[in-house]
Every structure is written in structure tokens, then in C-alpha cells.
Amino acid sequence: MKKLFIAAAFIAATVSMNAQDYNRVALSYDYTGLGFNKEMDLFGTEKAETVGQNGFGLNYAHGFGVATNMFVEVGANVDFLFGSRTEKGNGEEAKFKTQNINLQVPVNYVYRFNIADGVSIDPYVGINFKLHFTEKYKTDYKDLEDPEYSRDGKWISVFDKGEDAMDGKDNTWNRFQMGWQVGVGVNYERYYLGVQVGTDFIPAYSHKFEYGGESVKCKVNTTNVKVSLGYTF
């Protein structure tokens, strides 16, 4: 029994030495695709449509060493996103614009493969919690035949229930989302390059309406991509 305790203590000490905690700061390119189902019908096309949001993120992560080459990584990311989509028809051009600022808290399981001295590859999978500080949109219209009749829309918050905004709680979007991600990072000494993709379990918007005895579900799903360049210390 004494030998067993000694062996266990030796393994624990070895794990502790080989799984050191770390911190990382990174700047990222971020993309979020807003997938509107056909019931949302942004431009009267009666088909599903996607509006891409592009931007950048400020990212921090702390890795907790739990075993040799295994880590639990917890972080905080602030993303700034901007998007637009343009449709033309009936002598008019409609441009739908969006702006978003959100906070994400990812929790990842990371396994490290040491390739060479100072070089490693970190595949990971995890979940994230997302809180939207702001999400707003507007639609600008351009008369292609007579520019004098062109008009700019006003910015509307998707969280505003007012009559001049989303007109009721049934039309407002979710301020909180939860999702998952999978990715891989490459470490070269203290420098880090990472790529990840994921989707959100909780949609940006989802509501079921009743029209004439029929049920219609309007939904906006989100897909996320992040490319990060960081420094580990």
C-alpha cells in the first residue's frame, strides 16, 4: 500500500510538471453567418437567405493543466461584427445592414501534440456562452431610376420591443446564446495561430406564429468562424 501511495504521488508530481497553466492574448478575424429561414423573408424572395457578418475580436484564454498534454481552457472574447446584403428588383436596390458587439466565454478541452522543440499542435472542442451587448440593423433603399426617391433606413435594435422597433416581445431576438466549437491551434514557441468553426444551439431568433390555423416558425440560426493570432505567456 505504501508503494502504491508513493507511485500515485510520483505520477501526480509528473503530471503537474508536464501540464503547466498558461495565458494567451490574441487578435482574431471573426465571421458570423446569420441564416434566415424562408419564413423570415427578408427581401420578398420567399427563400432562405444568409447575411454574413465580418469583424474582429479581442481574445483572452487561460489554460488549466489537468494531465500530461491535456488542458481545460477558459476564456473571454469580445467581438465586433458588421454585415450587409444587397438585393435588386423592381427598379430598386435594398441593402440590409447589421452591426453586432458580443461577449463570448468559451470552455474548451485541449490536447497537445508536441511535434518538435517549441512546436506543438492543439486540437480542441468545447462549448461557449454568448451575450450580445448590441445587435441592430437597418435597410437602405436606392431608386435605380430616380435617385431622388432613395432613402436610408434607421438603425433598429433587435432587442427593442417598442412599436418603432421590433413591435413586441415575440419579434425580439435572443440576447443570450449558447453553442459549440471545434478547432486547432499551432504553437511556435510563444506564438499561436488558431482556426475554429462552430454553431449555436440557441438560435439568434426563433418564434412560432399562428396564421389562419397554420403554424409558421420563423428562425435565424448562426454559424461562427474565428482565425486567431496570439501570444502565450
Image: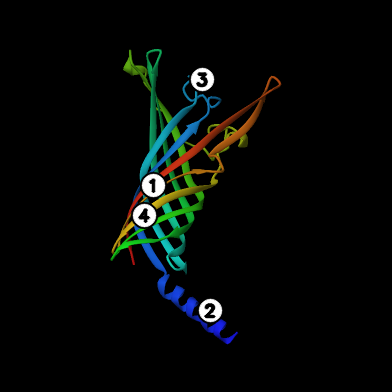
- Separation of disc 1 and disc 4 at Cα? 11 Å
Q: Earlier in the sequence, mark 2 or mark 4?
A: 2
- Separation of disc 2 and disc 4 at Cα? 32 Å
Q: Relative to 46, say whether 70 is above or below.
A: below
Q: Which mark is residue 226?
A: 1
- Mark 3 or 2: in front is 2
Tag 3 secondary structure: loop
Q: At x 56% / y 81%, what residue is drawn?
A: 4
Which residue is tagged 2? 8
Tag 2 secondary structure: helix
- Mark 1 or 4: in front is 4
Q: Position of residue 202 (x, y in %)?
A: 56, 43
Q: Is residue 20 visible?
A: no
Q: Position of residue 127 (x, y in %)?
A: 51, 52
Q: Amino acid at mark 4?
A: Gly
- Mark 3 or 4: in front is 4
